[in-house]
Amino acid sequence: MIENNQVINFEDKILKSSLILSSPHSGIYYPDDFFSLLKTDVSELKQIEDSLVDELISGNLDKKNLILKAVWSRSVVDVNRAKNDFNYNDFEPPIEHISSKPTKYSRSGIGVIPIKCGMGENIYNTKLSGELAKKWLDVAWTTYHQTLIELLQKAHTNFGHYILFDFHSMPSTSENLNNKIDIVLGDCHGKSIHPKCIDFFENELSKQGLKVRRNSPYSGGYITEFYGKPKENKHAIQIEINRSIYLNEKTRQKNSNFDNCKLKLNKAINNFEKNKHNLLN
């Protein structure tokens, strides 16, 4: 099994900026022992992946900001959940050496190891063994967060602060998006990033012609909540992008607006980069 921590724009091992980008749900890797356990079709699992988000946010970044990209599919291990966000009884035999602490996500079948797909159907034809589940967690969840922690700590040491932009994509058919929202910014309702930072970034996105909403229906997942500690000069924001503005949601291929959407996001990121010190001081 491969690790879950591809770092983009880090070829020279030099951290050029305190602004780090992440894409925890754009991975497409499935371990070999996954397929024999499947009840649902892989095409159904693709529908909950953040397809092409990593490519959408890379490109013409003035500071060559680091991007941490998950390699594993979120259908296998969801790194935007706590490592103990699972139900003890969902595995047979149970997962050992990790005390479960289920949340609303795992109680709905979409915890750190999802057991249901986007349509609410069971992913597996039987309960996963705790041994296999723990092996997946130890590789996929641990390597992603170890790498993210190392990068953020290095940024905090070098620059006195860090800012994490955690990018995701959202389905256009959500009941909460009937008024055609392009971007949802989540700051855990004002708890994960300095207010001047999110205000500025929201304004930059709006200037690009994007319709932005804050904290509804996505206020920030585990990554935003865990790594966002503004009082310690540690800032994080979750950025949800409406999939219809950059890809065909059925085929998961780029649509005709992909390059335009990428350009707008790059401009907003670059303008934030230029102004971040003034925002934090």
Image (tube, grey):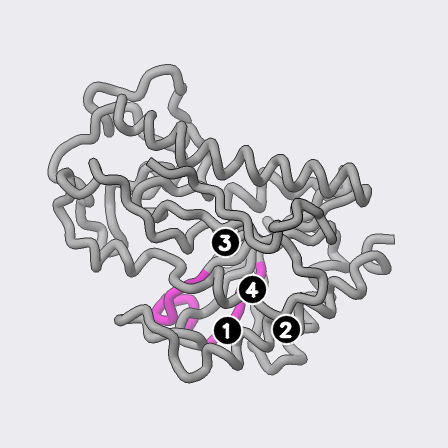
Point out the residue furthest to the front here.
12
Real-space CA distance between mark 3 and mark 2, rounded to the nearest whole angstrom: 18 Å
With respect to residue 199, does 36 lie above or below? Answer: above
Is 74 within the magenta? no
Q: Say which of 241 and 9 sits in front.
A: 9
Please state if 36 lies on the left or on the right of 169 as rendered: left
**Is disc 4 placed on a helix, strand or loop?**
loop
Q: Is tag 2's residue or tag 4's residue first in the polypeptide sequence?
A: 4
Q: Residue at x 62, y 40 (%)?
A: 227
Q: Residue 23 carries which label?
A: 3
Real-space CA distance between mark 1 and mark 4, rounded to the nearest whole angstrom: 19 Å
Q: Residue at x 41, y 26 (%)?
A: 101
Find disc 2 in the rendering and name its residue. 205
Please state if 108 lies on the left or on the right of 233 as rendered: left
**Residue 157 makes an appearance in the image:** yes
Give the image location of residue 234, x and y in percent: 71, 42
